Image (tube, helix red, strand yellow):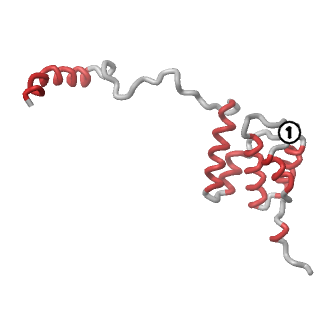
Amino acid sequence: MTALRAHLPALLIAVASCAVTPSVCPAEPSRAGTAVPVRPGAPADGELRLSRAAMERARGHARGVIEQLEGMDFASGPAFAGADRAAFLLGDAYRETGDTRRHDALVAAGSAWPRTTVFTAWLLARPAVDPSAAPDTA
């Protein structure tokens, strides 16, 4: 306790100087230069949208997946590393909502990609309409 009393005046001066001039003692360390802005069309934009779409998919919100991914251009090929997964999630959301026109257009775009992945193969293999949901005509 006596050690604290001996250092109390210096501690009070330090606290008072931080209160008067916050730039001397910032509340958080400066992170200048470490933040990467995400703008539409920036390379990180695709990964960010994919992450958000995956979150929406996990919550069961097909419309949220569509809102995140439908603005991407899949016709010109994969624009980022996870584009195949994004196309799969978008196609699955179109399929779930019954939007066969958009699903078919996405399948056509994905079939023109130079490399087939697990995600694009699965997208191409699934029909726009679930056959098990069709009424039985037999």
In this view, the residue in front, 112 or 121, is 121
Residue 104 position in % (x across, y down) = 86, 53
Judged from this view, the residue extending furthest toward the left is 2
| Quadrant location of the N terminus in the rendered image | top left
* Residue in view at x 38 percent, y 28 percent: 28
Residue 6, picture quadrant: top left
Residue 91 position in % (x across, y down) = 78, 52
Judged from this view, the residue extending furthest toward the bottom is 138
* Residue 124 appears left or right of 93: right
Q: Is residue 50 above or below residue 91?
A: above
Residue 26 position in % (x across, y down) = 34, 24
Q: Is residue 138 above or below residue 7?
A: below
- Residue labelled with disc 1: 115
* Residue in view at x 67 percent, y 33 percent: 40
Q: How many marks?
A: 1
| Quadrant location of the C terminus in the rendered image | bottom right
* Residue 18 appears left or right of 131: left
* Residue in view at x 68 percent, y 49 percent: 67
